[in-house]
Image (tube, rainbow, N blue to C red):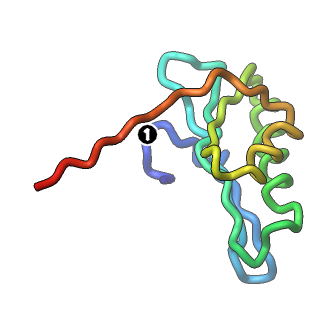
Amino acid sequence: MTDHPTTIPEAFLIACRDEEYIGLTYLRRVPGLPHILSQALTGVTRDARGLGVATALKVAGIEWARVQGIAEIRTWNSQHNPRMISINERSGFIREIAVCEFRKDLPE
């Protein structure tokens, strides 16, 4: 993740509890759109969920982007992750029109 060409190493944020990594979020550049970033992932270990770690990481990423003069952050969610959808909405992200993905499994 950190070696992807659009990942911003300074915006790769890790939450720790003592010596244990319990969460992360990171921001990426959007090619051709210098004032827009993508929040590519926010994740927290199962035993640390519900403690505000994801919210703290999200806020830290937003603040980092604000200091850098970024105008917009985009993110996405699975519809099966209502907790993160709620965190994003409380953080001020606005829902856009949904994109539907289709998959067809083909027999061998």
Q: Quadrant of residue 14?
A: bottom right
| Residue designated by label 1 | 5
Residue 108 in the image, given as x and y percentages of width and height: 10, 55
**Depth check, front residue: 21 or 81:** 81
Residue at coordinates 57% horizontally, 37% vertically from top-left?
28
| Mark 1 crowdedness (10 Å alpha carbons): few <14, some 14-19, many ≥20 | few
Residue at coordinates 75% horizontally, 65% vertically from top-left?
15
The amino acid beneath tag 1 is Pro
Q: Quadrant of residue 53?
A: bottom right
Q: Residue furthest bottom?
A: 19
Residue 30 in the image, given as x and y percentages of width and height: 53, 26
- Say above or below: 15 vs 46: above
- Say above or below: 70 vs 47: above
**Depth check, front residue: 74 or 3:** 74
Q: Residue furthest front?
A: 107
- Say above or below: 24 vs 96: below
Residue 4 in the image, given as x and y percentages of width and height: 43, 45
**Helix, strand or loop under label 1:** loop
Residue at coordinates 56% horizontally, 31% vertically from top-left?
29
Q: Residue furthest left?
A: 108
Residue at coordinates 72% horizontally, 23% vertically from top-left?
72
- Say above or below: 13 vs 51: above
Residue 5 in the image, given as x and y percentages of width and height: 43, 39
Side (left or right) of 52 relative to 77:
right
